[in-house]
Image: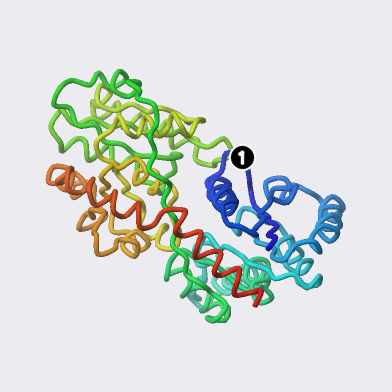
Amino acid sequence: MKILNFSSHYEDCGIAKYQENYVNELQSHEGIKSTFFKYSPYQTREMNEAEFNEVIDLLRKEITSYDIFHIQHEFGFYRGNQFERLVNTAKNAGIKTVVTYHTSPDLIIIKKPLTGLGPRSLVNYVKSYRHNRILTNMHIAPLLRSDIILAHNEYTIGQLIAYGVPKESILLIPHPTYPITKPKKTTFIAESLHKKEGDVILSTVGYIHRFKGVTNAIKALSYLPSNYKLAVLGGVKSDSNDHKLYDQIADLILKRGLTDRVFISGVVDSDDDLNSYIRETDISLYPYDSKYYKGVASGGLNLAIANERPVIAYPVATFKETNTEISQLVFTRSDSYYELAREIKNIDMAEQTKRIRQYADANSWTNITTQLVSAYNSLLK
């Protein structure tokens, strides 16, 4: 079985790391070869039509030597009809097509109701309707020709069905957990926060984004004793539209008098370094916006699990869905930084660490890759 992947790869991108892990795991499966297509969506989305035509010509030549074409979908990856053309090129060549859909469509395709019968309301409604129709044609219609759509949570599946994607073509596949890491021991975080005996180091992990609740983690610190400190393990991504947020976070730290209790690492380029820094901390916090993340899987959450850190999170639907009978995650009662502080004080760290290990073993990349192989095999019977 030969799989050609259209995905970001060997780039500073969560989806890139996600699919690289699958490709690496598939190497251990006899008779399976999984490779990346030459171009990444980060390259193709910037291309004009003539340049993208050359990409399609190359794909048309290469695709015939493969059994399956596997596309990673994220809304920012594609412009115009690029996603549609990729799917059609594979299907016209008789190649089975798999799409991993990472984000629920209703986070981008927002159906606004008619708010009145005045001219302005009618014009805004028509504009919104036309915009949504364009997005639907770009990001949903190509799924109707695909053979399998993989999604990470029931919410996304429900939304895809609501947009007309056949239920029988959608498969729920959990977001795998990274293997338990054994990184080198570091003291960078301890030194940066002047750690003393009895200190409890909290962390947020991943790129700083307004929906990831870094400000809520900082505010929660105000309700905790002075021996609680926070390491923000990440910075603002270079292509983010959230650069002002960084200054706003720094201003909040100053305003609350927490400069000695909060350290921001900035972007950590090395995965090994990031794993080491996470292991210097005691508890990982995920006060994510419940509305935004209701249809989005979080690779950052799995980094805490891979490093055996207890997790406290807001009750995000996708997080709750993955919380098995092991109860590996601790949830706040509401999206409140006061409730976050409450759970931080009450958590049984030893017990939650044990549960995290159990979950990581059960949902390892090795085990979930077996599910992916089963999905591939079902197409080739």
Instruction: Identify residue type, mark 1.
Output: Glu
User: Looking at this view, is 58 or 132 the one in front?
Assistant: 58
Q: Where 114 falls versus 234 (above or below)? A: below
Left or right: where 192 falls relative to 226: right
Quadrant placement of the N terminus: bottom right
Residue at 76% x, 67% y is 90
Quadrant placement of the C terminus: bottom right
Residue at 52% x, 81% y is 167
Q: Give the residue at mark 1.
A: 11
User: Looking at this view, is 17 or 124 the one in front?
Assistant: 17
Residue at 65% x, 61% y is 70
Q: Where 165 falls versus 328 (above or below)? A: below
Q: Secondary structure at mark 1?
A: loop
User: Looking at this view, is 28 or 149 the one in front?
Assistant: 28
* Tag count: 1
Residue 2, given in percent of the width and then of the height, sits at 70, 60
User: Looking at this view, is 112 or 338 the one in front?
Assistant: 338
Q: What colouring method underlies this structural image?
A: rainbow
Left or right: where 124 falls relative to 69: left
Left or right: where 224 falls relative to 132: left
Residue 110, given in percent of the width and then of the height, sits at 52, 67
Residue 5, given in percent of the width and then of the height, sits at 67, 56
Instruction: Decide: few, some or many residues near mark 1? Use Cα within 10 Å; few <14, some 14-19, many ≥20.
Output: few
- Quarter holding residue 89: bottom right
Q: Where 4 falls versus 132 (above or below)? A: above
Residue 34, given in percent of the width and then of the height, sits at 66, 54
Residue at 49% x, 40% y is 242
